[in-house]
Amino acid sequence: MALINIDFRPSVKRERHPAMRWALFAAGSIVLGAVIASTTSVYQRADVPSSETLSVQLKDAAQAREALIEKPPQSRIARQSFKLPLPELQAQQEIIDEINHVAPQKWQEFVVKSGDSLAKLFKRAGIKPQQLDEMMKSGDAAKKLTKIFPKDVIRVLTDGEGSLQALRYEINHESYLLVERTNDGKLNSDVLSYDIEVRQKYAQAEIESSLFEAAYAAGMSDNITMELAGIFGWDIDFVLDIRKGDSFTLLYEQLYRNGEKIADGNILAAEFINDKKIYRAVRYQKPGDTVAKYYSPDGNSMRKAFLRSPVDFTRISSGFSLGRYHPILHKLRSHKGVDYAAKRGTPVRAAGDGKIIYKGTKGGYGRVVIIQHGSKYSTLYAHLNSYDKHIRTGKKVKQGQTIGYVGSSGLATGPHLHYEFRVSGVHRNPLTVKLPTAQPVAKDLLDDFNLKTQPVLAQLDLLARTQLALNN
């Protein structure tokens, strides 16, 4: 049987002429080139970045998204709000508000003046009164704002409806208070710390006329100078004992924030040579203690149980004597104390820890305070102009606490403090009596004391020897 072919088209193989194929390819290339050129031109007009630039931008955008998730821009700018001048801070805020599609918010800065309160500052900032109550309930940290002082600086961020969005208050050079409105619409307060860099500083000087002049020449601040005097103040009277040729050497800290010095830190170790006698002190904090104290290199406390002089005076107008001519009574009479001449109103300090056993008028003494220090010692302060409002008979006082003010009550020719020091009821010369020391480092802590202080003392020795070599 013959097969029937259902394809009625003739089976013919077609071939194109080679010249025609090249003509078609050329025409296609021209058209494709025109399309590509047109497309490139459109992209260029639209400022589309190159592939390399686009890759960088996508990477930056990804990082930005991660940063936004971790910490919103509002939080970041609130944290750095004291680093920026107010105009620059506001400019950044406007950018953030635009990105977040929120109504413009405003930063304001207020310097606290005498008589100011938070309520007054909020009113000045246009913040609704109820916002103050909400902020004070935002956390315990907000309680820091209950005690603001003149010259304190506070920055606030508000929206257009008088709602507080953020507040920043610098507590000190180490920490600040930050109040922020969180994503749930509530205010949250926290005390945050700065990153503080601690650097060590060395100073050395020889005294020509006064401690403060020598310290100033050595580049020391008044605070460090006062601390130095306080460390050695139980052994050296910086009014009467200082001599030309005395010298000091110290190693202390300076605190830096963002590369800028903001304050002095602690004195780590110091040496004072007074009338050729060497006194040395080193800072040490006992394990478990919150406060460091100063000790001699062998572990004895630099602090004595009593101050050598309980008032800042200009001169000693009368010393300890068993037969002094009294300027008012005009007869010889024992003077069993020391008179410190000082301006009326100069604070008088408790010479040591103790309990007030007498406060009142006592004959020629005028207004008097008597303090009992344990069972063995007592001190008397006479001719006071007035008493400190916090003291009363039976109340305990701390060493250095103000108990009254210099005056001329009783038999006195002028304002001065009459000071007496008694041991077991017997008068002793306050200028020469051997003062008991405070507790030394406990024996079981001496290894820890030596481990922590010897490197600092060795550094002080090295610096002192280096300076001596340079001077010679």
Image (spheres, grey):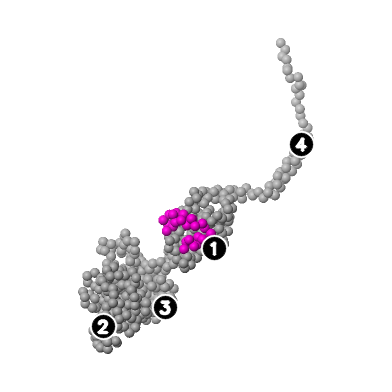
Q: Nearer the viewer, residue 191 or 47?
A: 191
Disc 1 and disc 2 in contact, CB within 8 angstroms: no
Residue 358: give x, y in percent of width and height: 26, 73
Disc 3 and disc 2 in contact, CB within 8 angstroms: no
Label ID, residue 335: 2
Q: Residues within 10 Å of mark 3 (few under 14, many from 20)?
A: some
Label ID, residue 24: 4
Viewer-nearest of discs 2 and 4: 2
Viewer-nearest of discs 3 and 4: 3
Q: Amino acid at mark 1?
A: Pro
For disc 3, the marked residue is: 213
Residue drawn at (29%, 86%) of the image: 328
Q: Amino acid at mark 3?
A: Glu
Which numbered disc flags the more N-terminal residue, 2 or 4? 4
Which numbered disc flags the more N-terminal residue, 4 or 1? 4
Residue 386: give x, y in percent of width and height: 34, 75
Q: Residues within 10 Å of mark 2 (few under 14, many from 20)?
A: many
Residue 185: give x, y in percent of width and height: 50, 50
